[in-house]
Amino acid sequence: MLRTLLIATAVVSCVQPDEPELGATEQEASCPIGRCGGNSPLIGPFKAEELNEAGVENSSRVRLLGYIKPGTNCTVSRKCKVDVRGYQMFVKDIYGNQMTAGALVGGYLQVWQPGDLNFSPPIPAGEARIYLNTYSTAARFWQYPYEPLDSYDLVYEIPGIVRGPLCVTSPSVIDGEGNPWLRRFEAFFYTGDRYNQDTMTVTASTYAEAGDWFNIACSGSVTAKLLLNRHATAGQSGSAIVTTRAQRQAMLKMYTGDFCGDGTTYTVQGTPMRWVSSTGVAGPVGPTLNSFESYWNENGALCMDRHRLASSTNPDEAALEGMIRNGATNTPPTCRVMAKCSEISIPAGVAYLMTASPAMP
């Protein structure tokens, strides 16, 4: 399970209502990739950030059974096969007929879930559904060319027990970088990359490596940001931006605030920031930024001048910089003490990303 530094007011969205109040200590939290600091696809208590077309269980033991749509050849007894190609979803019936895009609306992905009797209400093992309610191409890549992407509004249902939006928390209309979320309640399907939520690492970065696995990336999640910034295999086609696995992992760690490089995140959803890569790719010019923050590579932050939350009015958020820099007792033992970037020399080619912080100098 992903280790996340929980602070009492900063990560309320990551704490379940029946959990005790948490102070500024490291805790084991149910915060998979794309949830703390973003939006997570959940079927009740079960993670659905990736599914396998061949029906292999994901990390929550959820497995895809197929696609069903009333009035078509995709029936309960003859489910259609799901096939995600790049950032588009297709389904095919037993006769070879294919549907995609808006034609999928009104149908659902049928999945099997393992049950959770501790959930309220208790859930026995069995069927769950992910309904495709609406379809849009309003969302566009954040990096040139600004092509439209397929996105869907998704609702899950465990029949007779619970129903709700698959994407738990929608982002702001404009995020901390200044990027627009044109479809705040929708999600993207894409393949070609896989992610380890415990260590914040990229574990597959080609279509061959990803195999039958595909991502469900809710608006606001880090997996959606990687795709929209063309730091995913599905975002490379037709673009001059070509990234390596290490570069994608550097962006993953930068966005999630994994300064130490071990999967522990030190950030808060919606924090203003600015980034630029060594290859010239950059985010938009967002809110006023005052300080240099860090250099980043696939191992996390190489150094830190001013943490993005150092000037926060929340004392727990503001304390993060000192904890990382000084190696406080509740900082993970794998975290290396952060030197100031202004006091060391970073050899050419070592860092991929540079970030600016809203904190005061």
Image (cartoon, grey):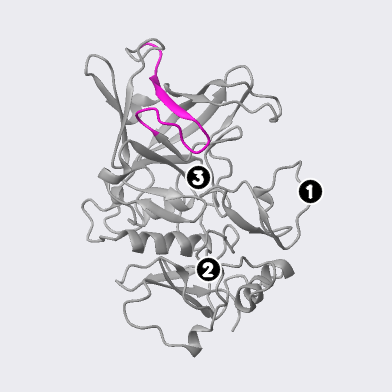
- Kind of element beneath mark 1: loop
Q: Which residues are the magenta region?
A: 52-71
Residue 259 is marked as: 2
Give whichever of 166, 333 is nearer the camera.
333
Say left or right for 103 vs 344.
Answer: left
Residue 184 is marked as: 3
Residue 159 appearing in the image: yes
- Kind of element beneath mark 2: loop
Q: Does residue 290 belong to the magenta stretch? A: no
Which quadrant: the C terminus? Answer: bottom right
Contact (Cβ within 8 Å) of mark 3 with mark 2 = no
Q: Earlier in the sequence, mark 3 or mark 2?
A: 3
Contact (Cβ within 8 Å) of mark 2 with mark 1 = no
Task: Write down the residue under mark 1.
Answer: 20
Q: Earlier in the sequence, mark 3 or mark 1?
A: 1
Q: Earlier in the sequence, mark 2 or mark 1?
A: 1
Give, as a three-letter code, the residue at label 2: Phe
Query: How far from the left and from the top, in percent, is residue 171?
Result: 54, 50
Say left or right for 194 vs 17.
Answer: left
Query: How far from the left and from the top, in percent, is residue 18?
Result: 76, 41
